[in-house]
Structure formats: C-alpha cells, structure tokens
C-alpha cells in the first residue's frame, strides 16, 4: 500500500518534532493534518498547514469529543478516513535536568498531566480512528516514545512514566488490533537537537550526550521522522508491536 494520498494525523504538529514528522510524511505524498491545542500556536499552525497544502485543526487530545470531531472534519475534508495516526502530543514539559522536579518535590498532578496527554491522548485517537480503519481495511498507529524508559540518564519521573505506559499500550494495541490489519509501533527518541522542549537543556548536556553516542552527535527531529515514515509505509506492513530507538546508538535494545 503506497503512502501517496493517504491521510495522516500527527498530534502536536504545529512545530518541533511533530512538524518534522508532518513534513516527512508530506514529502511521501501523504495528506497530513496539522494538530495543535494552544491558541497562541494558531498562526504558526495555519502557516505550516498552508505550506503543506493541508488543514490545521485545534483539538485537545485529552478530550474524546474534540478528537472525534477532528476525525469527522478530516474525513469530510479529504473524502476519506485517516489511515495513519502519529501520537506525538506532549503535555507542557521542559527537558532541563538541573531544574527538574525530584521525587521529594514532584506531585501526582505532574504525573497526571503527562499521563493524560500521552496515554489518554493515544487512547482517544485510537478509539476515534477505528471506524475509519475498518472502512479502509486497516491502518497504522505510530506512538512517539523515549529512550529514557530504557536508560533514565536523567530521571524525568513524570515524563518517563507516561512514555513507559505508552510503550505498554503500544504492545497491547498491536495484539488486539492485529487481526484487523492495524499495526501499532513506537519510535523512541533520545535528546533531540532541538525542539521547544529541549531548548531548556544546557548546551553542555548536548555535548556530553554526543560524546557517549556511537554516532558522536545528537539526533535531529528530521532523523527521527524517518523512522515514523518507515512504520507508516509499505515496507513495515508485517511489523507491529515493535519499538525503534532513534538516538544514534546510545541505547541498544
């Protein structure tokens, strides 16, 4: 099944990694829906949608009604359902190791924010995608994870716990939906140079990570996006329940 003229939703795609993924899919001929939640991102989202000849829709992935409405609007606009879902949306978070909340400071509300955006968001998009997948006879779900689950070099407790839960959700979703020709995989990144979230990371940390990474550099959003395109495309039609770590070889699984 060619990627050309398929419809993809990339959550949290007005900028950063999400936008890099959207651009990579667009380059393969996919109609990519730009999604954002912060009203201050509207101008940026609309400008990027125009550049990609697509639409931008504001929707909070933690709200099932909003997500279902997004799927309905997209199917009406393109006259076909979404066949590829990329769960990239991230709750407000900054990768600032020295400034992170330690266990004696962190609260359940911090965990709740990350779990709602990461896990509840993925559940909402998956539930909303199923009717369209069934019309099409299959679909692709690609979740964005982190190598911190395997290698918590900086213990971002709330963020990493949410991504660990998303990895488990990836496995169980792959098992349940496989008979319906729906694949579900994860692309786990390391520290990326650079996104809004990693802009808070001290420069010396980038250098330290590069020094211990086999490729001797920090991964870019565009490099991670390539793995997403693989999972979305025809070469991965028999791959499900898997995780690719895209971090220059820092974590080997």
Image (cartoon, grey):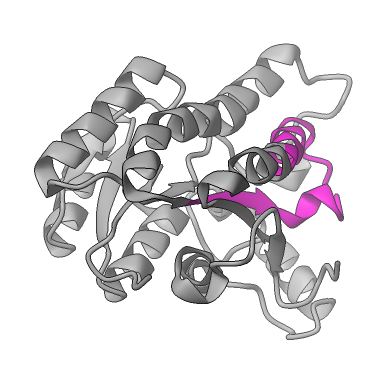
Question: What is the number of callouts on the image?
Answer: 0
Quadrant position of residue 21: bottom left
Please tell me whether residue 78 belongs to the stretch shown in magenta.
no
Quadrant position of residue 219: bottom right
Query: At which x and y percent is residue 50?
Result: 11, 57
Query: At which x and y percent is residue 235?
Result: 52, 77
**Up-down: is 92 above or below 97?**
above
Query: At which x and y percent is residue 220?
Result: 54, 71
- The structure residue drawn at horizontal position 54% and vertical position 67%, both measured from the top left corner, is 237
**Is residue 244 something one can see in this rendering?**
yes
User: Which image quarter is the N terminus in?
Assistant: bottom left
Left or right of 9 in this view: 210: right
Please tell me whether residue 152 belongs to the stretch shown in magenta.
yes
**Up-down: is 47 above or below 112?**
below
Q: What is the magenta range?
A: 140-168
- The structure residue drawn at horizontal position 69% and vertical position 43%, both measured from the top left corner, is 175
- The structure residue drawn at horizontal position 47% and vertical position 50%, both measured from the top left corner, is 196
- The structure residue drawn at horizontal position 26% and vertical position 71%, both measured from the top left corner, is 4
User: Which image quarter is the C terminus in?
Assistant: bottom right
Q: Nearer the viewer, residue 103 or 226?
A: 226
Q: Nearer the viewer, residue 239 or 224?
A: 239
**Up-down: is 36 above or below 34?**
above
């Amino acid at each position: 099944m060619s990627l050309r003229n398929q419809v993809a939703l990339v959550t949290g795609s007005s900028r950063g990694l999400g936008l890099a993924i959207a651009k990579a899919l667009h380059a393969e001929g996919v109609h990519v829906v730009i999604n954002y939640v912060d009203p201050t991102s509207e101008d940026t989202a609309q400008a990027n949608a125009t550049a990609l000849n697509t639409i931008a829709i504001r929707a909070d992935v933690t709200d099932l009604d909003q997500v279902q409405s997004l799927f309905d609007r997209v199917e009406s606009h393109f006259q076909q359902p979404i066949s590829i879902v990329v769960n990239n949306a991230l709750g407000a978070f900054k990768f600032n190791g020295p400034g992170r909340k330690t266990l004696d400071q962190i609260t359940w509300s911090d965990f709740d924010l990350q779990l709602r955006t990461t896990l509840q968001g993925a559940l909402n998009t998956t539930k909303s995608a199923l009717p369209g997948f069934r019309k099409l006879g299959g679909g692709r779900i690609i979740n964005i994870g982190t190598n911190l689950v395997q290698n918590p070099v900086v213990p971002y407790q709330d963020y990493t716990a949410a991504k660990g839960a998303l990895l488990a959700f990836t496995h169980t979703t792959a098992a349940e939906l496989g008979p319906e020709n729906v694949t579900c995989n994860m692309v786990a990144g390391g520290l990326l140079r650079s996104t809004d979230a990693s802009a808070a990371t001290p420069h010396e940390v980038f250098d330290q990570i590069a020094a211990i990474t086999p490729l001797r550099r920090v991964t870019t959003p565009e490099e991670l996006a390539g793995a997403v395109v693989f999972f979305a495309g025809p070469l991965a039609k028999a791959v499900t329940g898997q995780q690719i770590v895209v971090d220059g070889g820092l974590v080997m699984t």
